[in-house]
Amino acid sequence: MKIALPDLGDDPQAKLLLDIQGVFAEYERVVISERMRRGKLHRLKNGETAPPRAPYGYRYQKAPEGRKSWWEIVEDEALIVKQMFRWYTQQSVNINWIARQLNQQGVPSPDGKRWYQGTVRRLLRHSAYRGTAYYNRRRSDHSSVGQARRQGYGRLRLPRLIPRPAKEWIGVSVPPIVSEERWQMVQTRLEMNIRYAQRNARRFYLLRGLLVCGVCGRTLQGRTQNKRITYFCPHGGTRRPSDVPPHRCTIASEQIEPLLWQELSALLQSPLQLEEAWKTMHKQQQASPSQLSHWQQRQALLQKQCQRLLDAYQIDAISLDDLVARQNPIDIELKELEKKLTQATPVETRTLDLDTFTRHIQRALSSADPQLKTGSYSFVNRAHRRD
């Protein structure tokens, strides 16, 4: 049924009324959306529902009347998940081999197409397969939409997904597909592969991934021709976006590398910069014991809270669903604290003064090798992005 709206004409009061109605309608839309979001989070915390998006191997079942929604295991997909975990822990294979093997067997991927390394890695990292799914792990950041990327792909068209603190995650119990032990073995191997991955290209480029085209904002690539190294933009011709004009951006390594190293050396030799870095290092050494003490006190407090929840459950003060919903965020934070305390090492007391610190920096700059230069460029580039 269509409602005929009156013709407001060119009356200024009528246009003002229409604008005010639009503002209130937009306000109501935002308020309703926020209330629905809070209601969903409340139901998830109390174990009254399951996350609506189920990963590969599960199927989301809507809540019938008088019951809560849940995840149901899809047996055919669960067998594929178990096989991937078994391959990655029992055989000396990599993620690329697993994706290639699944494609050869004709197994459909989660999107019904081919398997890729990113798809397999994402599934191997998913915590739901060990019996715990997390909701509210990330939030959308719309502030950078439309701005040029600092590296790689032109302008941002979609909001960024920023991780939330672990204490804001909502853990939901789901049927496990693999055991906790096998899931932990896979995570350990994935972390080891990231740490010791061979990411070097066939040729060494000192400024690889650090130079950006001034026209399209994409990262320049290194190229070697007749033993001459240049950095160029590969997106200035037919590969450019429709809103970017044709352009050529090429610079030789013998022109840009000495200039950048000269500027970087001058920056690191500045007395004010060195004094600030020395003071920052000194403060961090003094603050480390207090941080360690804070983590230990927080850990003891959370352990007491867990014991109180168990005592309340044993005397039937709370239900099992309430126990799981309240204990999951505590378990997540306890695991983070245990990881920090395990990795924390006693900070050595150093008597390094500013003059000795300055001499160390100058000696390192005078004997810098290509690897040290690459690390220095990357450090300054990350610091510039944070600023």
Image (cartoon, rainbow, N blue to C red):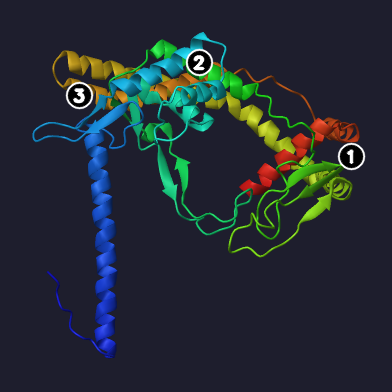
Pinpoint residue 165: horizontal percent, then vertical percent: 43, 35
Residue that numbered label 2 is attached to: 88
Q: Quadrant of residue 334?
A: top left
Give residue 98's mark: none
Mark nearer the N terminus (1 vs 3): 1
| Residue type of the residue flagged with mark 3 | Asp
Distance between the alpha carbons at the discs numbered 1 and 3: 67 Å
Of the residues tagged 1 and 3, which is closer to the observer?
Answer: 1
Residue furthest to the top: 90
Pinpoint residue 351: horizontal percent, then vertical percent: 77, 24
| Residue type of the residue flagged with mark 2 | Tyr
Residue that numbered label 1 is attached to: 227
Residue that numbered label 3 is attached to: 321
Judging from the image, what secondary structure is the residue with disc 2 in? helix
- Left or right of residue 135: residue 98: right
- Left or right of residue 227: residue 160: left
| Residue type of the residue flagged with mark 1 | Lys
Mark nearer the N terminus (3 vs 2): 2
Q: Quadrant of residue 360?
A: top right
Q: Residue at x 21, y 86 (%)?
A: 7
Mark nearer the N terminus (2 vs 1): 2
Q: Quadrant of residue 25?
A: bottom left
Q: Residue at x 25, y 68 (%)?
A: 24
Q: Report whether residue 91 is seen.
A: yes
Pinpoint residue 191: horizontal percent, then vertical percent: 56, 21
Do labels 2 and 1 touch, CB within 8 Å?
Answer: no
Q: Residue at x 27, y 46 (%)?
A: 37
Judging from the image, what secondary structure is the residue with disc 1 in? loop
Viewer-closest of 170 and 82: 82
Distance between the alpha carbons at the discs numbered 3 and 2: 34 Å
Of the residues tagged 3 and 2, which is closer to the observer?
Answer: 2
